[in-house]
Every structure is written in structure tokens, then in C-alpha cells.
Image (cartoon, rainbow, N blue to C red):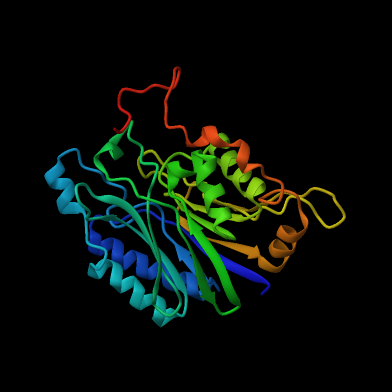
Amino acid sequence: MNTFTVAILQILPADSRDGNLQKGIEFCRKAKNAGADLALFPEMFSCGYDIPEDLGALQNLAIHADDPFISDFGQLAKELDMAIGITFLEKHDPLPRNTLRVFDRHGKEVLTYAKVHTCDFGEECRLSPGEDFYTAELDTAGGPVRIGAMICYDREFPESARILMLKGAEILLVPNACPMELNRISQLRGRAFENMLGIVTVNYPYPHPDCNGHSTAFDGIAYRPDGSWRDTLVVEAGEEEGLYLAPFPMDALRQYRKDEVHGNAYRRPEKYGILLDSTVREPFVRADKRK
């Protein structure tokens, strides 16, 4: 295949779940018309990344994974012959989860991922963290693509992307809800570079609270065949609401992964035992760390 195109839906939420559904459907149709293979939403779009302090209100805002809000996007994916990555506040015991579900172009659920690295220093202390990182083979009109997922704060831990690379991911989907500035964007550039994979991040636009757009995509291909370097940036959105296309050159990416020295070939995992040590020492001790 030549390209795998992701539609970045950098859009503001409406004032209700039904409003988010209708707006989401509208933008998915625009994504299909623009030639996308997959449309991706920002973080927890079902509620516009709203995490009430009151636990009763939080539970009422959460929805089951088979809620019509979710299944309607599955039906839409089949209708449009286009994959959709929809995000939502998922009902879960004991506390809701921050979840992404990906439907393929046939309307089949292929990936469900709950955010592992919840922001426990803030309002996400009221959410349950996910349990693992997953990949899935996504059937597209141009051929299969192996996708994986991180959500927002996950990207700040190199282990997240590394695990997904080791599980075979070629493209990482990253719903997001925070200010995207030089350093956070640089993290994503680094994750793509060191794992030789594509990363597409979808943020809320300004003026959504604590968000500023600047959704990005990096293809991870740092060097040309002649050895000269290139910019791995595929697209960077501005602050405003809109739909942005991120075309990933899959043939070139796969050849690059076969030829270059990053990724897995020269790792020394037998030397990395300390990575499994859960002890937290100063200066990193935090009283609000989840027990």
C-alpha cells in the first residue's frame, strides 16, 4: 500500500452527548469525503473530557461500551467504509475509565484501550487506569495496518510506545486533551523516531479548557535512502477547530523499519531489569501516587 490516511478531528465538543454524537457523525462524513482511512477523535469525546468532582455525577456521565453513542459510530464506520476511533468515559467498576474504541471499515470492533497512565495528580485520580497496551490489525482498502493506542499522558512514558512497538504496532493513535507545546510535541517526535513508527495525536482546539489544538502526526522516517536526514513531521494543526489529514507512507515506513538501526534489533533487554523495579525514590516520591 502507498498511504494510510488518518483524519485528525480537532473539534470542540457540543453541549450534550447527543450533540457530540451528531457533530462526530458530521465530521466523520467529512473525513470520508476527504479520503481518510480512519477518523480519530480527541480524548474522551463523549463528554468533552469532563471529569466531575462529585462521584455520583461522574458515574452518571459515564457510558457502557455498548451504549448507542458507541455502537452508532460502529454502524457509521460500516456505512462509510472507513475506520473510526471514538473516545469516551466508560462505565467501569469501581470507577469509570478513559477509553478509546476503534471500529474497522466493516463496523467491527478491533481495539479497545483504556488509558494506563491516568493523571492521578489531578482529576483523573477519580478514574480507573487501564491494564495493558494493545495492538490490532486494521483492514483497510490498501491492505492491513497494525495499529496501537496511547492516550495523552501515556506519551510521557517511553515504555508505552516501546511496548506497542514490540507488539508490532506500525501506527500509534493518541487521543489527547492538554496544551500541546514544543516539549510535548517533541516527545511525540522522539517516540516516533526511536520506535520507527507513525504517531498521530488528536487534541481539542482552542478555546476548549486547557487545550490549544496543535494536533500532530510524525511518520518516524528520519533518514532518506541516501542517508540524509528529513523532518518526520507529517502535519501540525493550528489552534482552530478543523479536520486535518495525516497521510502515512506505509511502503516507505515498512522499508525503513527493515533497514534502519532503531527499534528492536540492537536492544539489550537483559540489562534493563531496573525498569521492573516499582520502588519510587526521592526526588520522585509523591503523596498522591495511586496505591
Q: Residue at x 40, y 42 (%)?
A: 117
Can residue 248 be seen here? The reply is yes
Q: Quadrant of residue 212?
A: top left
Left or right? Give the position of 186 relative to 254: left
The residue drawn where x is 30% and y is 39% is 124
66 lies above or below 115: below
| Residue 217 screen position, x and y as percent | 58, 53
**Outermost residue to the left:** 56
Front-most of 24 and 77? 77
Task: Compare residues 128 and 124 and report the one nearer the observer.
Answer: 128
Q: Give the position of the C terminus as an image quadrant.
A: top left
Tell me where residue 84 sits by quadrant: bottom left
Across and down, in percent, residue 17 comes to 24, 60
Residue 192 vertical position relative to residue 169 in the rendered view, above or below: above
Report whether residue 238 is seen.
Answer: no
- In the displayed structure, 275 sits above or below 138; it is above
Name which residue lies at 43% across and 49% down: 151
Residue pushed farthest top? Answer: 282
Height in image: 213 above or below 246?
above
Residue drawn at the location 38% of the way across and 49% of the way down: 115
Q: Name the quadrant of the N terminus.
A: bottom right
- Identify which residue, 246 or 257, lies in the foreground: 257
Furthest-right residue in view? 226
Q: Position of residue 272 (x, y in %)?
A: 58, 37
Horizontal side of 4 relative to 26 (left or right) equals right
**How many numbered marks does the figure carry?**
0
104 sits to left or right of 164: left
Residue 143: image x %, image y %?
60, 77
